[in-house]
Amino acid sequence: MLLQDTRDELTQYKESLEGELSELCSDIRGVGKCRVFVSFSVGSRTEYRGSSVVSVSPPEVQAVNIVCEGADDDVVRYTLVNMISSTFGIGTNRITVAKMS
């Protein structure tokens, strides 16, 4: 696979993930309008055995930033941070929730 193809796939995956997370977060009571940015620590990994692909792992999420209308509510922030932490198995210190202007 060419390097450009890999970048395109990663970009598509990132945009899809951010879109799904934005929708999910917006469905939580009190969040309102929402935007999500995801950063990765490692790209996807492909494991080979001989010339055959054995498995493909998605990129590892390093951090998630959420900007939403309801970020000034402690319950909203708590809910978002814990949902993202448990979804990706990342520490709460890697999740930021900020008020949308």
Image (spheres, helix red, strand yellow):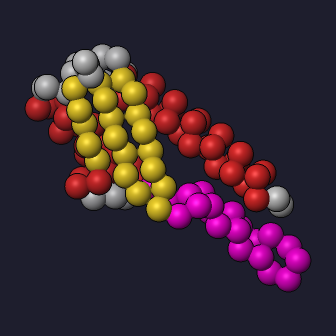
Q: Is residue 15 visible?
A: yes
Q: Residue at x 39, y 27 (%)?
A: 35
Quick one: which residue is furthest to the bottom in this view? Answer: 50
Is residue 59 covered in magenta?
Answer: yes
Q: Residue at x 25, y 36 (%)?
A: 97
Q: Residue at x 88, y 77 (%)?
A: 51
Is residue 35 covered in magenta?
Answer: no
Residue 48 figure quarter? bottom right
Reply above or below: 26 against 51. Answer: above
From the viewer's side, name the closer residue of 47 and 9.
9
Please provide the residue range marked out in magenta. Answer: 42-61
> Could you tell me what secondary structure mostly forms the magenta stretch?
strand
Q: Quadrant of the C terminus?
A: top left
Left or right, 76 with respect to 64, comes to left
Left or right, 16 with respect to 63, comes to right
Residue 100 figure quarter? top left
Report the number of numbered marks.
0
Give percent across and percent down for residue 54.
Answer: 76, 71
From the viewer's side, name the closer residue of 14 and 74.
14
Q: Residue at x 36, y 23 (%)?
A: 34
Reply above or below: 74 against 83. Answer: above
Q: Is residue 24 visible?
A: no
Q: Quadrant of the N terminus?
A: bottom right
Left or right, 26 with respect to 101, comes to right
Quick one: which residue is furthest to the left in this view? Answer: 74
From the viewer's side, name the closer residue of 41 and 22.
41
Give percent across and percent down for residue 62.
Answer: 41, 57
Give percent across and percent down for residue 30.
Answer: 23, 19
Give percent across and percent down for residue 89.
Answer: 37, 58
